[in-house]
Image (tube, grey):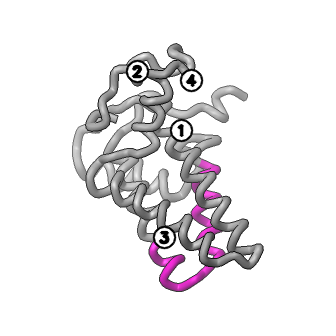
């Protein structure tokens, strides 16, 4: 059962960036078309990636198996910060979905805009905001040191 809910460590940075790019495209389409079902699909993708890693999420599978190999050798980075970042994406997208369903569109679309900012930073610049937060929390002892030993030594450019 533990293998079912395992998240890879390390993670291919190229695949993570491509997945973020796919999230960005879907989120942009959702915002521009005001399609709530796309927000639901984004939230489901984040939940799948948090729970099962890249094995079940269609965007992650496409990134890992098709897109990332186009760049050649993988660039390996710690997995726990990436899972944490996926969790933040899940919280943002689920919150946006709930707000949209409750008839609070300004707040829901604003959360989607925040998600697009984070996804664009990750996909275009390799700057993972969730990874930076994870490192800061780990350095302060709020995340157990054993979870990701190398994460306490990450600077924002390495996260």
Dot 3 falls on a residue whose secondary structure is helix
Q: What's the residue at 48%, 83% (across, down)?
A: 32
Question: What residue is disc 4 on?
Answer: 142
The residue lying toward the viewer, choosing from 144 and 5, is: 144
- Asked if the residue under mark 2 is in contact with the one under mark 3, i.e. CB atoms within 8 Å, the reply is no
Question: What residue is disc 1 on?
Answer: 84
**Label disc, if present, on residue 26 of the rendered structure:** 3
Sequence-first disc among 1 and 4: 1
Task: Name the front one of labels 1 and 4.
Answer: 4
Tell me which segment is drawn in magenta.
27-48
Which quadrant of the view contains residue 28? bottom left
Q: Is residue 43 magenta?
A: yes
Which is the main secondary structure of the residues drawn in magenta?
helix
**Above or below, comparing residue 118 to residue 106 in the picture:** above
How far separated are the C-alphas under marks 3 and 2? 33 Å
**Label disc, if present, on residue 152 of the rendered structure:** 2
Number of residues whose C-alpha sits closer than 10 Å to that of mark 2, classed few (under 14), some (14–19) or many (20 or more) = some
**Above or below, comparing residue 80 to residue 108 in the picture:** above
Which quadrant of the view contains residue 155? top left
Q: What's the residue at 56%, 73% (across, down)?
A: 109
- Asked if the residue under mark 2 is in contact with the one under mark 4, i.e. CB atoms within 8 Å, the reply is no
Left or right placement of residue 32 versus residue 69 in this view: right
């Amino acid at each position: 059962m533990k293998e079912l809910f395992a998240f890879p460590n390390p993670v291919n940075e190229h695949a993570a960036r491509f997945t973020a790019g796919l999230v960005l495209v879907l989120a942009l389409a959702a915002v521009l078309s005001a399609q709530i079902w796309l927000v639901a699909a984004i939230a489901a993708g984040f939940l799948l990636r948090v729970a099962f890693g890249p094995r079940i999420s269609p965007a992650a599978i496409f990134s890992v198996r098709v897109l990332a190999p186009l760049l050649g050798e993988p660039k390996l980075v710690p997995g726990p910060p990436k899972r944490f970042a996926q969790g933040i994406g899940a919280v943002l997208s689920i919150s946006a979905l709930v707000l949209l369903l409750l008839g609070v569109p300004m707040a829901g679309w604003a959360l989607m805009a925040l998600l697009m900012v984070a996804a664009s930073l990750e996909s275009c610049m390799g700057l993972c905001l969730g990874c930076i937060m994870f490192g800061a929390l780990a350095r302060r002892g709020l995340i157990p040191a054993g979870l990701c030993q190398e994460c306490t030594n990450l600077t924002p450019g390495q996260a």
